[in-house]
Image (cartoon, coloured by chain):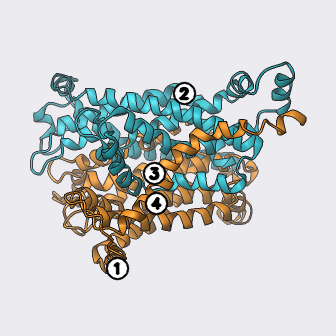
Chain colours: A orange, B cyan
Amino acid sequence: MAAIAHPDRNFKYWLISPAIFLLLLIGLFPLIFSLVVSFMRVTMLETDTSFAGLANFVQLFHDARLWQSLAHTVLIIIVALPIELLLGLAMAYLFLNHMPGRPILISLLMLPTIISPIVAGATWRLLFDNRYGPINQIIGWFAGHPVPALWTVNPGLVYPAIIFCEIWQWTPFMFLILLAALSNVDRSLTEAAEIDGARLWRSFRYVVLPAIFPVMSIAILIRGLDLFRIFDIIWALTSGGPGTMTETVSVYAYVQGFRQFESSYTAAIAFLVIALLTVVVTWAIRRMGLAK
Amino acid sequence: MTSVPFHRRKETKLVFRYLTAVLLVVIFVFPIYWLFAISFKTPGEIFAVPPVWYPKSIQFNNYVVLFKDGDAKTVGNSLVLASASTFFAMIFGTIAAYSLTRFKTGGENLAVWIMSQRMMPPVAIAFPVFLLYVWLGWVDTYIGLIILYTAFSLPYVIWMMRGYIEDIPLELEESALIDGCSRWEVLWKVVFPMARSGLFATAVFTFVFSWNDFLFALVLTRTEVTTYTVQVTHYFGGQSNFWSKIAAMSVLGTIPVFITVATLQRYLVRGISMGAVKG
């Protein structure tokens, strides 16, 4: 224990300094920069660095479109996240025990999760097409007549479309993590084939759930935060439309910064989001003891 | 209890379980099948009503067009950016994780801060970084995106590698020190080789994150280092989507990921379970 635990003073700092330097670039710099610029009146067309006081932040609180985009984001999270969790858990149970071709089936289920979200969105855009896409065709078989549903345009269908795509891509992620967690639980407790429903539920509720809970909460945290910053799938499917109906916080911030060129105002949004998330995430990481 | 013998019930359940599993896999894989199918279809087959479920013949015309127009070079850009940033993130991330694990550098506060960076929304980072890059002249350059991807991957690499480094027995490092290795040599000769499977598993995910990125590339590239993800969205257009191009470009961008994941699968399964279970 002697030598290794008492390094030359500088060595441990040498090791960590490149990482810290880079993390300051994406961690601290955007936060401070956003804060400074958000007090000015900069737009991409005009560099007016005069002090605007709290004007941008006052505007934030009166910006209905911002709060709507936040509501859209929350809506997607509260619908998609529980479905991904429950479906992923059910699938993990289904695949837990031996069956023919199990490794291949699991590998195939991984595919949606490893493709790019923008490709996932593009793929579903093609699937959802009202004339040439297979989804309306399949629904038509069951309905008995052609169904010309405009999935990415009709206000009543855009959210189901986005959430379908989201669930398709990320349920396998939940599934893989929960499968790994379940595999570590005593097998006699998870042998679904051996015991009846009531006993299975009891063993799940009182033994299995507490055992997988730490892993499950990490998965929920990761997915929840990923969903909070959802951009690619929406950009590919609806670009926030129709109108601003499916605009999430990330889409709105992008539009303000890179379409409307409202630099100072976007900086205020960025600062708000970073500050909010840092508090929530730091609390969650400490609460869950992840840093240890 | 029914009168059906126990082992019969078990068999019926297995069959039922198996059919459900296969059905699920079909549902989850179908969209990817459809994407690949379109990329091999002729325009007549793509725009057929009702839809054609499989191309009559495999023809590569949709891909040839991408190579002729030079659009396919965006896949090359993605490859350069993702490989270089993975390389740097693995090196800087692993030595930082070593410092955090062995010497408790910065204590718990530093570890919490590093991990909290994993959760930052890209759009909130992209905007200030874009303005910084305009000033530095780094917009639409390899170096700009490589640095950003490296930085963005670091929290994940550090998080994962801490778990793997903890598993390396201290005695190995100590005996190497006693044998006269310098501390850097201990890193290269003991720590990196011992954490090999962890390095591969982590590198795969790091590569896939950067490879799949869209938002940073959308904001920070123009024409020179456009990635394939941005290129795909160039084919979206009001009335006439370039369906064949969307599909073929997406497939070109997806195949390298499938190959990477398939080749390194044995490291991957361990990587996923380790990452999840150890946190």
Instruction: Say which amino acid is labelled 1.
Output: Val
As helix, strand or loop, the secondary structure at mark 2 comes to: loop
The Cα atoms of the two marked residues, 1 and 3, are separated by 37 Å
Q: Position of residue B216 (x, y in %)?
A: 35, 46
At horizontal 53% and vertical 59% (from top left) the residue drawn is A85
Of residues A97 and B107, the one nearer the viewer is B107
Q: Which amino acid does the dot numbered 3 rest on?
A: Trp
Instruction: List the residue tagged with mark 2.
Output: B264
Q: Residues within 10 Å of mark 3 (few under 14, many from 20)?
A: many
Question: Mark 1 Cα within 10 Å, few/some/many (few <14, many 20+)?
Answer: few
Residue B259 visible here? yes
Contact check, label 1 and label 3, Cβ < 8 Å = no
Residues beneath discs 3 and 4 located on the same chain: yes
Closer to the camera in the image, B102 or B105: B105
Instruction: Please provide percent x and percent y for residue B142.
Output: 35, 32
Judging depth in this view, the residue of A216 and B89 nearest the camera is: B89
Which of label 1 and label 3 is nearer to you?
1
Residue at left offset 33%, top offset 52%? A233
Q: Is residue A266 above or below residue B165?
A: below
Q: CA distance from mark 1 to mark 2?
A: 51 Å
Q: CA distance from mark 3 to mark 2?
A: 21 Å
Per the image, the residue denoted by label 4 is A32
Letter of the chain that mark 1 sits on in the rendering: A
* Quarter where residue B54 is shown: top left
The residue under label 3 is: A170
Do dots 1 and 3 share one subunit? yes
Name the element at disc 4: helix
